[in-house]
Image: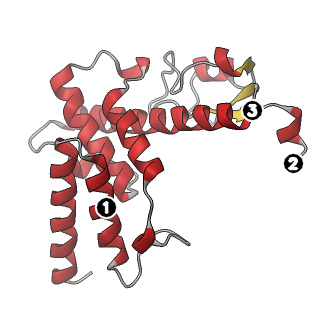
Amino acid sequence: MDKADRENKEIAERTVYNLLERQDFLGAVHVMAQYEASQEYPRGVGIDWGNYDGALMVEALKTIFNSTPVIINIIEENQLNQIRLAAGMMRLWGARTAQRWMPEGIDTATLDAWNDASRMLDFHASHLGRMQMFKEVGVRNVEVSGIADDRQCPECKRIDGKRFKLEDAPELPYAKCTCKMGCRCLLIPEDKFWRNS
């Protein structure tokens, strides 16, 4: 990426950040999509950024800014607002980490904790979006699918593979999770229709 390209991306990111601060989610999505459409090699396979609808992205951003999963509800509101902004930027720009949008000058431990909280906000938005989609298509039963590796905590192991009626499913990220990276459990449809398709 040359200097002009870097400057263009920085301008786009700054504009998007300012729109997120005002909670103009549709505006933020449009600026990001316009930037991607202007690139010779935009990110995302098969995404037509020039005609990007963005409705699902707007809903995810609304959730990030208006819903707090139990796992991070101890964070003070003024800090949580900064974390929401960083999580929104992470979601919009397809980043794996939110660190570049965190305030400058915070210590490493706080930065790591805030980055984990950003991931949990983003993850929670994805979870609620999936739950809504499951309701719309008639899924009645779900199963918790955990990541069975050496980073899985005992609490996530305990719910891995458990089945629930959709309305009784646990909130994700799981409130009791102690995984260093945060909860990585997902709900998957358990209904016979889904298993045979």
Image point (26%, 43%), residue name: 86
Q: Which mark is residue 30?
A: 1
Q: Which amino acid, mark 2?
A: Ser
- Is residue 41 shown to the viewer in this render? yes
- Which residue lies under the disc numbered 2? 197
- Residue type at mark 3? Gly
**Which quadrant holds residue 74?**
top left
Residue contact between numbered discs 2 and 1, judged by CB atoms under 8 Å: no
**Which of the two marks, 2 or 1, is nearer to us in this view?**
1
Q: Visible in this render: residue 185?
A: no
Disc 1 marks a residue whose amino acid type is His
Give how far across and how far down residue 94 sits, in percent.
40, 57
Q: Earlier in the sequence, mark 3 or mark 1?
A: 1
Q: Looking at the image, which residue is at 32% across and 42% down?
A: 87
Say which element carries label 3.
Answer: loop
Q: Which residue is mark 3?
A: 138
- In-front residue for pair 147/54: 54
Residue 77's place in the image compared with 135, above or below, is above
The quarter holding residue 167 reads: top right
Q: Specify the quadrant that holds the N terminus.
A: bottom left
Q: Position of residue 82 (x, y in %)?
A: 19, 35
Indicate the secondary structure of the residue bearing disc 1.
helix
Camera-nearest label, 2 or 3: 3
**Residues at marks 2 and 3, CA–CA distance in whole angstroms:** 14 Å
User: Secondary structure beneath disc 2?
Assistant: loop
Of labels 2 and 3, earlier in sequence is 3
Please report contact status of discs 2 and 3: CB closer than 8 Å, yes or no: no
Would you call the spot at circle 1 few (<14 residues within 10 Å), some (14-19), or many (20 or more)?
some
Image-based side of 28 in relation to 136, left or right: left
- Distance, label 2 to label 1, CA atoms, is 35 Å
Image spot of residue 78 (x, y percent):
15, 25
